[in-house]
Image (cartoon, rainbow, N blue to C red):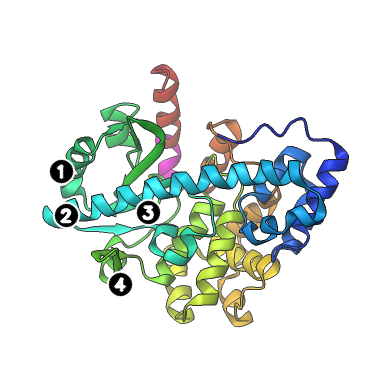
Amino acid sequence: MYPPIHKLMDRELKLCLELLKRSPNRTTLNRLYRSVNKEKFILISSEFPIEEELKTSKRYRLKEISDILNKSLLICSFRKKLLYDNLITLIKRFNQEKIDFIILKSFAYSELIKTRRISDLDFLIKAESLNKCLLILREMGFETVMKSEYYFRTFSNEVTMSLKSNPQIKVEPHLTITPKFSPFAVDNESLWNNSKIKYFDGQKARALSDEHNIIHISIHALYQPALSTPFRDIYVISKIISNKRINWESLVNDALQWNAGNFLYYSLFLAKKYFNAKVPKSVLVKLKKRNLQYLLLKFMLFKKLNFLRRKRYDVDDLLYELIFAKFCDKFNIIRRVTYAIKSKL
């Protein structure tokens, strides 16, 4: 998936750093360079929109580094093109079958598709549409990467499906925007009522409101297990804030009602710190609740900010979930993990 970068020498890495220092995100990149190892630095750097810097990289005689980053960006661009083509086909089919759906995260913003690495297509559907949705996706050539029907129905909020001809192309129908047994109390009805009409190549679809999308991405960045590089999501939040008019009062109220206030606080704080997002100070004050959740999140944030995205769920993820889960859900989390281990999922 990624280019072979483990052979990079110190001299080459320093040259790469000089190139990346010229990017709009140089402050973040410099901080990352000091806190992560060489491989992680290159991989994380490729998450940011550095295409313009690469165009002029020959001037600095960085051909080898440029080739490595260009290869990574080329792979990402090819995947995004395939995902977008499948998105258009999916929208057409869903509209024909009268299936309600909401496009989630970055694909809801055409300007963001160009500037971030996107590995899958996420959308929200209603439970009654699930079977028809899965049937359509199978007809399009997708197959279910489902641990088991029981596992999905009992323990999960989403189904992962990959394209048979290219397994790296994945789509994920979601029944909710948060994992089962999470501490959040998201109002699904509010998500649907406040969603906005958008058009993709002339095809009508829906997307979350900017406020709800920011909350969703905040949760995705700082809560989801096995997602240990939230900078990409923080960058997206900063772009949404810079390009849109945000109803800050509505954003704060919904986040607090859904028990996501501290997660949103840290996301906005990081967006302001690293990407100069124009977040009103009063918003941060309202969201910041110095309770146990706030202290635990602050303690664990360092780890999440300094580790690469992992492919597998591990003990740290289990502890992270158990700490934040409601008391009544802790047993269900242990049941889920136990079932997965017994079934070798």
Cα distance in 3D space between marks 1 and 4: 24 Å
The mark nearer the N terminus, 4 or 2, is: 2
Q: Hey, which residue is sitting farthest right in the picture?
A: 11
Describe residue 68's horizontal placement relative to residue 224 as left or right.
Answer: right
Q: Which residue is mark 4?
A: 194
Q: Residue at x 75, y 41 (%)?
A: 64
Helix, strand or loop for disc 1: helix
Mark number displayed over residue 177: 3
Viewer can see residue 206: yes
Indicate the amino acid at tag 3.
Ile
Q: Which residue is mark 2?
A: 99
Look at the numbered discs 1 and 2 and tell me whether their residues touch, using CB distance below 8 Å: yes
Q: Which residue is mark 1?
A: 132
Q: Provide the residue span drawn in magenta.
A: 326-332
Q: Residue at x 49, y 79 (%)?
A: 248
Cα distance in 3D space between marks 2 and 3: 18 Å
Cα distance in 3D space between marks 1 and 3: 20 Å
Quarter of the C terminus within the rendering: top left
Q: Is residue 123 above or below residue 244?
A: above
Q: Alpha-carbon neighbours of circle 3 within 10 Å: few (<14), some, or many (≥20)?
A: many
The mark nearer the N terminus, 1 or 3, is: 1
- In percent of width and height, residue 125 lies at 25, 53
Helix, strand or loop for disc 4: loop
